[in-house]
Image (spheres, rainbow, N blue to C red):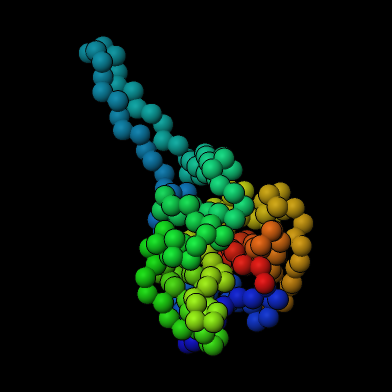
């Protein structure tokens, strides 16, 4: 199947926000929100004192704690044009080569748009789209499917509509046709949230 990018004008964008570069659905990196840790049994300090075992946290409690920590961290360290991936801060405003190096992207493939390329990172976890501009390759879009990635305001794949609105307010533009898309405009770029019940993909666009 040929590959297709999203556009800020929302033309043919609904399902493409959900499938990324290729035909395979994204397989997110190991999701720390799905893990539950059981504390090891503490050794007895005396013969008369029984050993104490910490009660394991519930999955819901751990999820809430990790989500809160992630939201606080991103709010402090990131600007709206940025997100963190594998310990690297990626900004839609950065130089294209710096972005590709930060994401570990190397190989690209053609899309069905003339002069457009797509870099697939982490089995469609993140897709970077570029185009030819007078012989120069320039960035147009970064699309995120990885559930472990959060925006600067703590929103990620799996977030609810209410959480997006709490973080970003009402969208600057919206379309509902098979899928729901909310677009937020910033200085020189925009962020688009694609919903399939909850957020299914997040795209950063260079403003045209």
**Can you say whether 164 is above or below 134 in the image?**
above
- In the image, what residue occupies the spot 70% across and 52% down? 168
Where residue 150 sits in the image (x, y, percent)? 54, 52
Where residue 87 sits in the image (x, y, percent)? 42, 49
**Can you say whether 117 is above or below 182 in the image?**
below
176 left or right, relative to 76: right
Where residue 124 sits in the image (x, y, percent)? 45, 70
User: In this view, which residue lies farthest toward the front?
Assistant: 134
The quadrant of the image that shows the C terminus is bottom right
19 left or right, relative to 48: right
- In the image, what residue occupies the spot 49% across and 76% down? 137
- In the image, what residue occupies the spot 70% across and 76% down? 9
User: In this view, which residue lies farthest toward the left?
Assistant: 47
Where residue 104 sits in the image (x, y, percent)? 38, 63
**Can you say whether 111 is above or below 77 in the image?**
below
Picture quadrant of residue 156:
bottom right
> As rendered, which of 15 and 81 lies closer to the eye?
81
Residue 195 visible to the viewer: no
> As rendered, which of 54 and 168 lies closer to the eye?
168
- In the image, what residue occupies the spot 37% across and 74% down? 107
Picture quadrant of residue 81:
bottom right
């Amino acid at each position: 199947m040929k590959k297709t990018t999203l556009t800020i004008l929302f033309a043919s964008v609904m399902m493409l926000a959900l499938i990324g570069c290729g035909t395979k659905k994204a397989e997110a990196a190991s999701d720390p929100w799905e893990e539950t840790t059981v504390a090891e049994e503490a050794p007895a300090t005396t013969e008369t004192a029984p050993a104490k075992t910490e009660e394991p946290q519930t999955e819901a409690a751990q999820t809430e704690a990790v989500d809160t920590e992630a939201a606080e961290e991103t709010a402090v360290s990131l600007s709206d044009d940025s997100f963190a991936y594998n310990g690297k801060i990626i900004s839609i405003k950065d130089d294209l080569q710096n972005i590709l190096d930060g994401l570990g992207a190397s190989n690209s493939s053609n899309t069905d748009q003339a002069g457009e390329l797509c870099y697939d990172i982490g089995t469609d976890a993140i897709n970077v789209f570029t185009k030819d501009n007078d012989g120069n390759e320039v960035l147009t879009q970064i699309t995120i499917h990885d559930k472990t990635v959060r925006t600067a305001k703590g929103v990620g794949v799996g977030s609810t509509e209410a959480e997006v609105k709490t973080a970003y307010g009402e969208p600057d533009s919206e379309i509902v046709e098979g899928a729901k898309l909310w677009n937020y405009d910033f200085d020189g770029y925009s962020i688009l949230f694609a919903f399939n019940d909850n957020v299914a993909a997040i795209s950063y666009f260079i403003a045209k």
